[in-house]
Every structure is written in structure tokens, then in C-alpha cells.
Amino acid sequence: MLEHGVGDVDWLEIVSENFFAPGGRPWAVLERVRAERPVAVHGVSLCIGDAGPLREDYVARLLRLVARLEPAIVSDHLCWGGLDGAYAHDLLPLPYTEEALALVVDKVRALQDRLGRRILLENVSSYLTFAASTLSEWDFLGEVARRADCGILLDVNNVVVSAKNHGFAPETYVDAIDPGRVGQLHLAGHTDHGHVVIDSHIGPVPASVWALYRRVVARMGRVPTLVEWDEQVPAYERVVAERARAAEIEAEVLDHG
Ligand SMILES: [Fe+2]
């Protein structure tokens, strides 16, 4: 895929766990990429919201990856994914309660102490909410970032998906987020089935996501932005073109602003 270099992109993102094994072809490709561009490290199984302490085996592998790669950004998701040793292989939404907030804040602080740097936490898409929640998702995310002193990876598509599924205005979400905390943005496609919107990462970025992206850029300025395209992946150049569209919109919004 990258025989001719990484193309017209400023940086790239990898999924952390794909590089926990310290060798082989994945690392050979990654070291070529890293020699050309900064790399962001994005995890999918930290499960920061799981009950109990951080998993030491996971933290050790993440520390090794970060020490070797010296990434520009280290991120994972504001979610849970395991219970009593069973792992769901999914990014599950938390109940937005003070109890969950205190748990996540303690674990983010502990992880940042181990890493010696800040992490970004990403808002996940969801299809259900908990009756026990006492906070909105945006207030919960903002409070985690403030109390743990971490950053936010704001996934604009995830906001649109969850807004449609749960019936809130996506503008309310992004307007509540402190721009000073946002260190990265994600854009992606989703699949609208009418009664439910699935965070499929299939296809180009939809108009609804571009519209919210314009609002985010107007509010937050220039933020490193990544296009995620994980299913029915087209030619690399097509994904790069989608990223170029984001840069065009960013320039349009900021030049007019
Ligand atoms: Fe994302």
C-alpha cells in the first residue's frame, strides 16, 4: 500500500495493539513510515472504564511501544470492554455517574504517571444509554479531561452517530467541549438504517459529519484531523483525498473566520 511513500499527509495513526509484537513486517513498514512522518498511537483495548486497576500487562506493552516509537499522540477510548476476565472486543459506553467518573479519573492519572505524558481519550459511539446516568456524555467527558488533566480526541462522526441514536443535538455536544482540551479529531463514515445509525467506518465522510466538522473547526481552530476508513477500504489515494477535503474545509472556515 505504501510502496510509493505515505503521500500528501502530515502524519498517520496506528492501532497500538497491532504493534505490541516487537517485530515482523508490521514493524518494518511502521519504521519506514515513522522515518517520514510523525505517528499517533491509538489504542482500542485499554478499557480505561473497566472496574479494577489498570491491567499491568497491557500497560507494560504500551510503554514499550511508546518508548520505541516516540509518537506525537497517545490515545484510547472513554469506554469499558471487560468484566471478570471476559473481554467484549467492543468499545462499550459507560454509565455517566460520579462513581464511574472517579474510577476513570484515577486510572487516567495512573496511566499518565506511568507514561510520563498526557493521553487523549476519545468519545465512543453508542446504541444504548444507562438509566443510572446522572451526567450528559459531554459533561462526563469534559470532567474526565479536567480532573485527570488529559486531552480529548473528539470523534466528530461518533457525536453524529450517538446524537441520532439518542435524540440529542450534536451541536450541544461539541459546543460544551473545552477547545483547549482537544488534541485530535476523527472523521469517518457511518451507516444510517433509519431506526439506528451504525458507526461502520464505511464510505466517505457524510454531509452531516462535514457540517459538524465545520462547527468544530470554527470553535476550536486548527486541530490534527484523521479520516478513519476501516471497512470496504478503497485505494489509499481515495482516503488521502478525503483527508484533503478536511484540509479544504478547515481552510475555508478559518479564512472566513
Ligand atoms: Fe474514532
Image: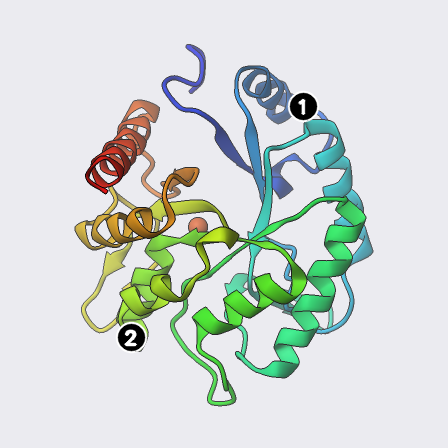
Q: How many other residues sit within 10 Å of disc 1, few (<14), some (14-19) or many (≥20)?
A: few
Q: Could you say which quadrant of the image residue 246 lies in?
A: top left
Relative horizontal placement of residue 212, taking residue 24 as reference (left or right): left
Q: Which of marks 1 and 2 is nearer the N terminus?
A: 1
Residue at position x 63%, y 43% from top? 17
Single out the residue that lies furthest toward the front: 257
Q: Position of residue 6 (x, y in %)?
A: 44, 18
Which is nearer the eye, 131 or 199? 131
Relative horizontal placement of residue 32, taking residue 3 as reference (left or right): right
Under 8 Å from ligand 1: the CB of mark 2?
Answer: no
Q: Which of the two discs, 1 and 2, sits closer to the camera?
A: 2
Q: Name the residue under label 1.
A: 24
Single out the residue that lies furthest toward the bottom: 131
Residue at position x 64%, y 58% from top? 149
Q: Is residue 256 above or below residue 153?
A: above
Whole-number angstrom distance, CA of label 1 to CA of label 2 = 46 Å
Indicate the colouring scheme: rainbow
Q: Position of residue 237 (x, y in %)?
A: 30, 23
Q: Is mark 2 on a helix, strand or loop?
A: loop
Name the quarter where the C terminus is drawn. Answer: top left
Which is nearer the eye, 31 or 37? 37
Residue at position x 41%, y 53% from top? 155
Which is nearer the eye, 232 or 136? 136
Q: Check disc 2 and give the amino acid type.
A: Phe
Q: What element carries label 1?
A: helix
Q: Position of residue 59 (x, y in %)?
A: 76, 50
Inspect this view and state whether residue 53 appears. yes
Q: Mark 2 points at which residue?
A: 168
Q: In this view, does 109 lie above or below 210?
A: below
